[in-house]
Image: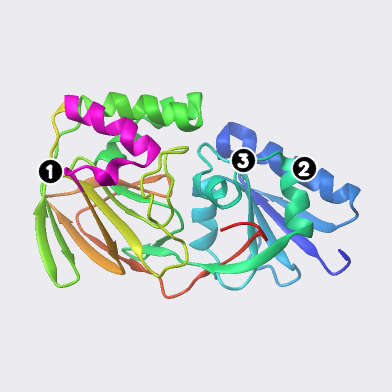
Amino acid sequence: MYAARNIAILCHTLSGNGKGLAIARETAGILEKRDINHTLFINEWPEDFLTFSEIWISGGDGTIHHYINRYNPEQWPVALIGGGTGNDLKTYLYGKNKTEDHIAMLLDHYEDHQIDLGNCNGILYANSLGIGFDGDVLKNMMTIRKTGGHLGYLIAVIKTIFTFREKYFDLFFADQKKRIQPVILAVSNSRLTGGGFVIAPKASLMDGYLDLMYTDPLPWWKRLWVLPKVEKGSHLLLSCVKHEHVSRVKIVPEGEVMYQIDGELKAADKFDIKIHDKKLKLRMFTSSK
C-alpha cells in the first residue's frame, strides 16, 4: 500500500535546539524499515516537490511558518511530526504521542483536510499572531529556548508581566472602530500558543474566521490573576477580556510595536490581518478534529 508514496521530510537544525533534526532522522529510520520512499532535507529545501506525494515537516510553528510562506500551501498534503520548541499547532491537531505511533497513524489512518491560514501584512501564519505583549515575551527567547516549551514560555511571560507598558491601538473590524489599551492582543487561527497556553479556546481551523482577543489595561497584580486563566482557556469569561470572530481586522498602534507570528519575532507600525485566500492541505489522523 506504500509503493506509490514518496515522502519529503523537511527540517532545520535550529528547530527545538536540534530536536527537530533528531525527530526527522528518527522518522527517516522508521520509513526505511517499512520500505517507504523518502528523502530527508536538512536546512536546504528544494525548489519544488514534483516527485513527492506528500511533505512531512519536523519542527515547530516556525518551521511550518517558513514552509507556507515559501511554497503553495494547497499543492501538497502536509503532515506535522513535531520537534520544535512549542509545537502548538502539532499538539492541537494530533495530541502528544511517541514518534513511532505518530508515524504509524500518518501512514495507516489519515485523511486530508483544508485548513485556514491567516495573512498579516502579506505574511502567512498557521497558528498564532500576538502583538505588543507577545512581542516583548519573545524578546526572552533565550530563556524559552534553554528551558523549552510551556515552562520556558511561562517564565518569560511572568518576567514580562512586571515590565510591560500598554500602548494605545485602534481596531477596525466589521464596520466598527475601537480604541483599546490592551495587555494581550492576539489574532489567532488555532487554539494554542506558547507551548500549550489556550489563548483562543473558541478557535477553529476550518471556520473561515480568525479569533481576535484583547484585554483592558491591567495592573501587574491583575495580570498575574489573569495568567492562569489564559493558561487553561477560561479567560474569555472575564469582563476584562474581549473576544470577536473576524475575517479581517486592521490594527494601528501608536508607533512601531513588536509582535510574534508563529513564534517569529517582527516589528510593524500597522497590521492588516485577514483570512488568506488559500488553504493549507493538511494530513490529519482520521480521529483528528
Q: Secondary structure at mark 1?
A: loop
Q: Secondary structure at mark 3?
A: loop
Residue 3 figure quarter: bottom right
Residue 15: x and y in percent read 57, 40
How far apart are the two marked residues, 1 and 3, measured between alpha carbons?
A: 37 Å
- Kindly identify which residue carries mark 3: 96
* Residue 139 seen by the camera: no
- Kindly identify which residue carries mark 2: 100
* Residue 76 seen by the camera: yes
How far apart are the two marked residues, 2 and 1, measured between alpha carbons?
A: 47 Å
Boundaries of the magenta span: 221-241
Q: Secondary structure at mark 2?
A: helix
Please say if 210 is above or below 155. below
Which numbered disc covers residue 264?
none
Callout 2 amino acid: Glu
How far apart are the two marked residues, 2 and 3, measured between alpha carbons?
A: 12 Å
Label 2: few (<14), some or many (≥20) within 10 Å? some
Of badges 2 and 3, the one in the foreground is 3
Residue 289: x and y in percent read 56, 58
Q: Nearer the viewer, residue 278 or 70?
A: 278
